[in-house]
Amino acid sequence: MYKKKTGVIGIIITVIILILLVFISNMDIKKMSYVENILSSIVMPIQNGLTYLKNKVSGNNTFFSDINNLKQENEELKNKNAELEKQLREFEIIKSENATLKEYVNLSEQYSEYTTKPAYIINKDISNYSSIFVINIGEKDGIKPNMTVISEKGLVGHIISVTENTSKVQTIIDTANTVSAVLSSSHDAIICKGTLEDKSILKGSYIPTNANLILGDKLETSGMGGIYPKGIIVGTVKTIESTKNITDRYITITPAVDFEKVQTVLVITSS
């Protein structure tokens, strides 16, 4: 039964095809053109779509090729950038070294009357109770305890201990340190010492009762006390503090050296 139905359907389809062939063969050229136009309007969008898809795929291939080129160019730029950064770091190091050497030369010229050793600070320990620097020269460089340490601006402190390659410097703002100084205008001698309250100032006391104190007056080392040579700048008078008893009056002093920023120093090995 199934085979019979299939055979009938096949015959019907064949007949339909034959009728269509006959119909098409009997159509005139105008009607054929009309049918072609209809078929063309159906087929062309499909063809155009296929062409667009082909071009798109082809374009994607170019896109992926461009991506690979961009990756390679990006890698080359990264390498060039890394090389430039390396050169910049080297330049900054050279610039820093040149600045340090220039500062050493200026220091040496400024204190040409002394025999000195240049050094730079490798560690700082500044607190309310102490102010200690560690410098990069030591016993092998001829450094000994009690040698004076100076900077371009003035007095830094003195050596308190040495190892073979390093030395500890007790700065003048350390509360355990004292400096005998004189006022530039009157040449009156006073004692300068660090304070617990403010590590950026010194306190000047034991001021003679007849001393003429002036704001902004400079103080220099007096040469007394056995450690610091005479004539090294200590700082300037910041304030004058009066008391009920004139013998107890004191001054505050701004150190010539900025202990937060100082990096290079000279150690006076002999005068």
Image (spheres, helix red, strand yellow):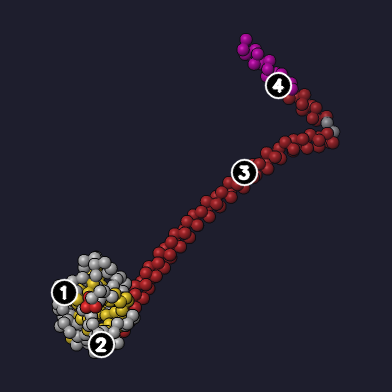
Instruction: Kindly identify the amino acid type of the residue bearing the numbered disc 2.
Output: His
**Which residue was labeled with disc 3?**
53
Label 1: how many residues lie within 10 Å, few (<14), some (14-19) or many (20+)?
some
Instruction: Kindly identify the amino acid type of the residue bearing the numbered disc 3.
Output: Leu
Dominant secondary structure (helix, strand or loop) of the stretch shown in magenta? helix
Q: How far apart in space, not on screen, are marks 1 and 2 (Cα)? A: 29 Å
Residue occupying the point 68% across, 19% down? 10
**Which residue was labeled with disc 1?**
160
- Relative side of 44 to 74, left or right: right
- Disc on res. 83: none
Q: Which residues are magenta?
A: 1-16
Frontmost of labels 3 and 1 is 1
Q: How far apart in space, not on screen, are marks 2 and 3 (Cα)? A: 98 Å
Quadrant for residue 217, please give it.
bottom left
Quadrant for residue 171, please give it.
bottom left
Element under disc 3: helix
Earlier in the chain: of badge 1 and badge 2, it is 1
Element under disc 1: strand
- Relative side of 141 to 85, left or right: left
Query: Magenta includes 262?
Result: no
Frontmost of labels 4 and 3 is 3
Q: How far apart in space, not on screen, are marks 1 and 4 (Cα)? A: 117 Å
* Badge count: 4
**Which residue was labeled with disc 2?**
187
Element under disc 2: loop
Quick check: can you spot residue 103? no
Instruction: Find out whether the residues at labels 2 and 4 contact each other: C-beta distance under 8 Å.
Output: no
Earlier in the chain: of badge 2 and badge 3, it is 3
Quadrant housing the N terminus: top right
Q: How far apart in space, not on screen, are marks 2 and 4 (Cα)? A: 132 Å
Residue occupying the point 26% across, 67% down? 197
Label 3: how many residues lie within 10 Å, few (<14), some (14-19) or many (20+)?
few
